[in-house]
Amino acid sequence: MNGAQDKLKVLFASAEAAPWAKVGGLGDVAAALPAALAGAAGSALDIRLILPFHAEIKRKNPTLGYLGAFSVPNQTGVFSAELYVASLHGITTYLLDSELTNHNSPVYYGDPALDGRKYAAFSVALLEAARFLDWQPDILHANDWHTALAVYALKTLYQQDSFFKETRSLMAIHNLPFNGYGSEFAMTELGFTPGTYEDLPDWARLTPLPLGIDAADQIVTVSPQYAREIQTRDFGCGLHEYLEKHHNKLIGILNGIDTRLWDPAADPYIPFPFTAADTNGKTLNKAALQRELHLEENPDIPLLTVVSRLDHQKGIGLLFDAIPDNARKPWQLVLLGTGSQDLEARAEDLMRQYPQKIVSLLRYDEAMAHKLYAAGDLFVMPSLYEPCGLSQMIAMRYGNIPVARATGGLQDSIINYHKAPDEATGFLFTEKTPEGLVSSLNSAILTFQEKETWAKLMNNAMNKDFSWKSSAQNYWSIYQEIKSKRE
Ligand code: ADP
């Protein structure tokens, strides 16, 4: 079983992988999970990553080799693609370039038709890349709508193709509402016809993610709680009935974080390293940040932090709504994020209104993110829904205590002070209202003043194991299960 020729071959297909192309958590996962899996499975697994060769990867100019060009069929003939190979965290990584995936394009345009075209083409081309390499994957591990059509193609365009006869598929859902709607034209161009599956709603018949979900041998969400939530009307985005009916092939596995990259004891971005046993460095990081951002330098004022995409999903609006009524209380807030124009405008307005207590940094800034995790006392994450969320885990590792909504991966990764004070690692609230957030923030701020209790919370949070180790073991078991279904 473990001989060289019996290695399980997994093609891990993603739109992002950090640090080459990262927009959000998917970039972290695609960078860390294949490497963690390789560590967990050792020589029994041959896992390779494939990404579009985005403009920003070209700009970073990684060391790579050129493998050659190959053809990909579409309705009007064929299009040509080129394949490069590099190593990312020790994992063989293919970078796929072609006219149809739009040379020199951003990771996402934010335009459904342009993104639809790029990723529909990438999904088909990545299968052809495997053929070009003469490397028959046992499992295609696709991530989100961007690569869902590769899963669907295995069951449709490539169903009779002997090269993929043995290939099974895993469809990972990192964010269900982003389903690739708008890809219809591109799909038709590539020869896809509308799905005819009776369990899927009509709108889904030319929509990548639901088609990938339906075609997959296994569906994985990035937390167990999110797997339960998407079977309900509130979170299921119109697919809850389908998902409930097919719950046998749905499982949730909590993501991990790269604990070498996110390590308060050895983080090159933070001026003062610290550990759970000695958090003095954290106090110094807080003072340094307060100075740098011209906030009052005072260890007793709770420092609230946000590092987030500014998207409706993240519930940042609840925080903004709560600020005017609570402006007199002693706290400071530093927010780092980019995203929707209205949330950015509100963040700027609030900084103008309360210059002594609020700093809004409206940019993507890796170094500042590390400094905020390290300096903050409270990490605010009032997400309306959260498939997993990595930021709260990073925050806990840096003793930055999350105040978060009890949903998805937040619920799975944070132990609520109100439920289990001795083991607690954060504060959870359920109401989707500014009042719900404020009440949880108030009790966190009160607890912050009880030095001993706070030290215990920090200690609990920093000692929690958020590494990929156990998740990678779970994925490895799932891979073996999928493979055994075939045999
Ligand atoms: P999502 O994937 O929904 O964006 P996650 O919590 O899973 O949310 O992951 C977010 C990741 O992106 C974290 O690593 C976080 O530190 C990072 N991040 C988000 N916004 C910024 C920013 N403005 N600058 C730097 N890093 C950011």
Image: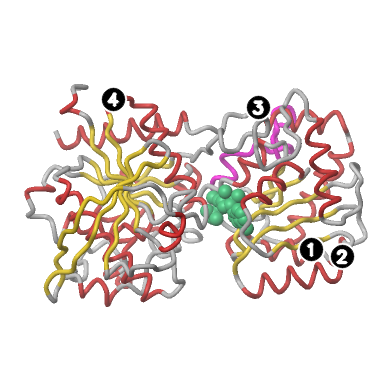
Residue 480 screen position, x and y as percent: 27, 31
Q: Amino acid at mark 4?
A: Ser
For badge 1, the amino acid type reads Ala
Q: Quadrant of the N terminus?
A: top left
Secondary structure at badge 4 equals helix
Identified at 69% across, 38% down, the residue is 416
- Mark 4 lies on residue: 43
Q: Earlier in the sequence, mark 2 or mark 4?
A: 4
Q: Return the residue at label 3.
A: 463
Which of discs 1 and 4 lies nearer the camera? The answer is 4
Residue 106, by quadrant, is bottom left
Front residue of this view, candidates 144 and 289: 289
Relative to 94, 105 lies left or right: right
Kind of residue sitting beneath label 3 = Asn
Task: Report the amino acid beneath label 2.
Answer: Pro
- Determine whether label 2 and label 3 are within 8 Å by CB: no
**Gap in angstroms between the C-alphas marked 3 and 1:** 32 Å
Instruction: Report the residue at 78% width, 36% height from top.
Output: 282
| Residue tagged 1 | 322
Q: Which numbered disc flags the more N-terminal residue, 2 or 3? A: 2
Tell which of 187 and 55 is nearer to you. 55
Please give the range of residues in magenta: 407-426
Q: Which residue is mark 2?
A: 355
Residue 480 in the figure: left or right of residue 131 = right
Where does the C terminus fall, quadrant-wise?
top left
